[in-house]
Image (spheres, rainbow, N blue to C red):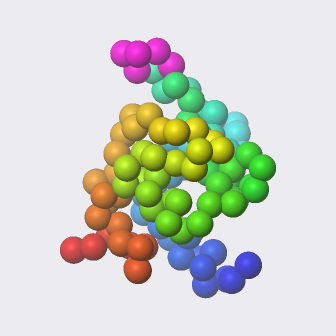
Amino acid sequence: MDATLVARGADLAAIGNCAACHTREDGKPFAGGRPMKTPFGTIYSTNITPDTETGIGKWSSDDFLRAIRTSIVKAAISSRLFRTIISRASPTTTSKRSTPSS
């Protein structure tokens, strides 16, 4: 893996505080499974690790950006994500820079 790309991803994950929702207590970072109580019942966060079988390792950059912007994900995973909390930066994240636009 490209070390620069990995470092950029780590920076974006820290900025977005992804681990707060996508890591359950005493769980593997970003592996999902964190329960979140909602008025509709308990939902569990998704696995956003680079694992190709259980995470998002097969997703393209476009797949990822579409998911954070619209909640629409690859059909093999699910048709929609339930947005419990939206990052204010997510809708303005650009595909060119993958950082919030101003």
Residue 58, picture quadrant: bottom right
The residues colored magenta run 38-42
Q: Is residue 81 left or right of residue 88?
A: right
Above or below for 100 versus 13: below
Is residue 30 at all visible to an observer of this figure? no
Q: Is residue 24 left or right of residue 95?
A: right
Looking at the image, which residue is at 44% across and 34% down?
82
- The picture places residue 60, in percent across and down from the top left corner, at 59, 66
Residue 86, picture quadrant: top left
Above or below for 11 versus 46: below
- Among all residues in the image, which is located at the extreme right? 53
Looking at the image, which residue is at 53% across and 60% down?
63
Name the chief secondary structure element in magenta: strand
- The picture places residue 18, in percent across and down from the top left corner, at 50, 52
Q: Is residue 52 left or right of residue 88?
A: right
Looking at the image, which residue is at 70% across and 39% down?
27
- The picture places residue 101, in percent across and down from the top left corner, at 27, 73
- Among all residues in the image, which is located at the extreme front? 75
